[in-house]
Image: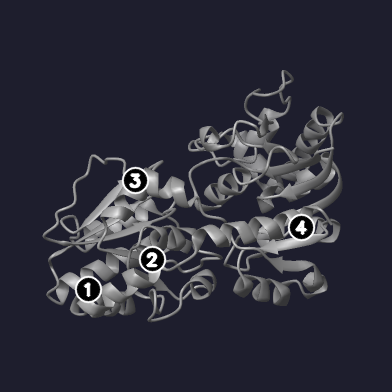
Amino acid sequence: MKKKIIFVTKALWIGGIETALVNLLNNFDYNTYDVTLLVLHAELDMIEQINSKCQLLIIDREQTVTFSTGYEYQKLYHLTEKADNPSRLHKMLMWTVPIIRWIENRLYIGFVRDLMKDKHFDTAIIYSDVVAETTIRSVKADRYLMFYHHGAMHRVYHDKIAYKKCDKIIAVSENQAMELRKFVPKYENKIITIHNLTDVDGIRAKAAEPTFEKFDKAKLNIVSVGRVSHEKGMDLAVKACAKLVKDGFANVCWWIVGDGPAMPEVKKTVSELNMEEYVNLVGMKENPYPYIKQADLYVQPSRFESFGLTIKEAMILDKPILSTDTLGAKEIIQNQKNCIICSCDEFDLAQNIKKIIDSSQLFNDISFFHKKAEFYNENKMLMEKIEELIGE
């Protein structure tokens, strides 16, 4: 009999965590496993990339998708949101937001539980920490596992109910696991490490697709891919580019691929530093790999990074890489061998880019090392770890 597995996540928008989830789902043997994915927010940009044998369930507060029954308490949910032009009543209610949010969350959990009441699984895997409580309280399973993806130990990312209930908490890098054990020492024996999988063939195939933007081969083209948020440090990329130009390295073009809450700040920085000629903000792309493929150098300017999936993807595309010193990068990168690690500031980023520009041999050494990496064998070993964990 097939083992019944359910993954639960918040959404399938374009992002590193979601890409890692898709890679994992697509590596399962569906002759052995009956796999379900439950999504609790109907942002489904990556849904078509998932193996068609994976059963998809979508339970959204805003709309009915999989089930015919709709959620009754949308208005209560929206009371906790900030309004552009709040009414007097809305302003009066804002001080009660924590109470309203708790009540509404319990109502939503009950809604999910009712829709899932006839389903039972051997293993439930919480893939997004924000759905931990909902999963524990509404999805019936013999055992629970939880992935932890965040490089920053912020309390908002932690759920004591899930830590207590889950058999294992899976950190996506050993460095991250060590930090997590310090943060929640009570559960240190539950914390293990399994890296994210990469879609080697898919990345290489997608990288061959055309883009509207053409790179000027006469320039040094630098590419950074990721969510435009404080954690990902795209503002540092703009400031590092300005430092390069100021120091006479003006033959540079920096491509930032992504979008997110910090985009207004990044655009403001581009304007204030007069970097419009040197920095291209291309926005979110479903397929960022052609940009990485065309790059002379891939730079990851993150302040926090639990794993650094895009670093691994740039390796697959055989690119020289410069990354800031984060938990994930230190684990993936062997400093001065296949990539360079630098401090998390614009000055060290710029200084190391100059070093790479001045050393053609460094480019060659990096490229050669990448070609020897055994990406396929690594994926196989990671899936064996996951299957062993599920089979316990």
Cα distance in 3D space between marks 2 and 4: 30 Å
Mark 4 or 3: the one toward you: 4
* Circle nearer the N terminus (2, 4): 2
How crowded pointer 4 is (Cα within 10 Å; few <14, some 14-19, many 20+) is rated as few
Counting from the top left corner in percent of width and height, residue 95 is at: 67, 48
Cα distance in 3D space between marks 4 and 3: 39 Å
* Circle nearer the N terminus (1, 2): 1
Element under label 1? helix
Cα distance in 3D space between marks 1 and 4: 49 Å
Which numbered circle lies on residue 371?
2
The residue beneath circle 1 is 243
Q: Residue at x 65, y 75 (%)?
A: 179
Counting from the top left corner in percent of width and height, residue 259 is at: 40, 48
Which numbered circle lies on residue 388?
4
The residue beneath circle 3 is 283
Q: How many numbered marks appear?
A: 4
